[in-house]
Every structure is written in C-alpha cells, then in structure tokens.
C-alpha cells in the first residue's frame, strides 16, 4: 500500500529536488502470507 508522498524530498547536486513515493508491506500481509491489492484509481 502507498504510505507517503515526499515532495521535493531528495536533493540533487546541480539540479532541482526530486519527489518520491514510499511503499511498505502491511504487517498483516507479511504475517499471513497474503497480498492486499493496491488501488489503481488513487490520485492522492
């Protein structure tokens, strides 16, 4: 599941900072061996 958006969070030598998105495995998926689907309509 998407956890976070980092706007201008990564400095770039000689350039503009870059944005990134952080993802993580849900603990319940890891412990149970299942996979939670990622929404495809998420524009947030």
Image (spheres, grey):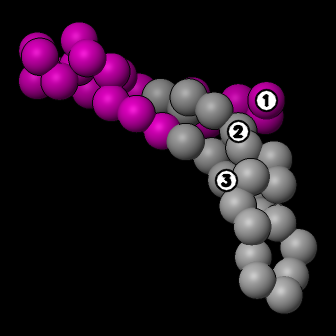
Q: CA distance from mark 2 to mark 3?
A: 6 Å
| Residue tagged 1 | 44
Asked whether, in this view, residue 26 is left or right of residue 37, the answer is: left
Mark 2 — residue?
5
Q: Which residues are magenta?
A: 23-44
The local secondary structure at tag 3 comes to strand
Q: Position of residue 25 (x, y in %)?
A: 33, 30
Which residue position is annotated with label 3? 20
Residue 43, image x and y in percent?
A: 78, 34
Nearest to the eye among marks 2 and 1: give it.
2
Neighbours of disc 1 within 10 Å: few (<14), some (14-19), many (20+): few
Identify the element where label 2 is drawn: strand
Foreground disc of the pair 3, 1: 3
Residue 32 on the magenta span:
yes
Q: In the rendered structure, which disc, 3 or 1, sits on the residue that comes first in sequence?
A: 3
The residue at 33%/21% (across/down) is 26
Report how far apart the C-alphas of labels 2 and 1 lie in the structure. Answer: 9 Å
Do the numbered discs 2 and 1 sit on residues whose CB atoms are within 8 Å?
yes
Asked if the residue at tag 3 contacts the one at tag 2, i.e. Cβ–Cβ closer than 8 Å, the answer is yes
């Amino acid at each position: 599941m998407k956890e976070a958006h980092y706007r201008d969070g990564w400095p770039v030598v000689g350039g503009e900072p870059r944005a990134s998105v952080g993802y993580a495995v849900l603990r319940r998926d890891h412990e149970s061996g299942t996979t939670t689907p990622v929404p495809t309509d998420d524009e947030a």
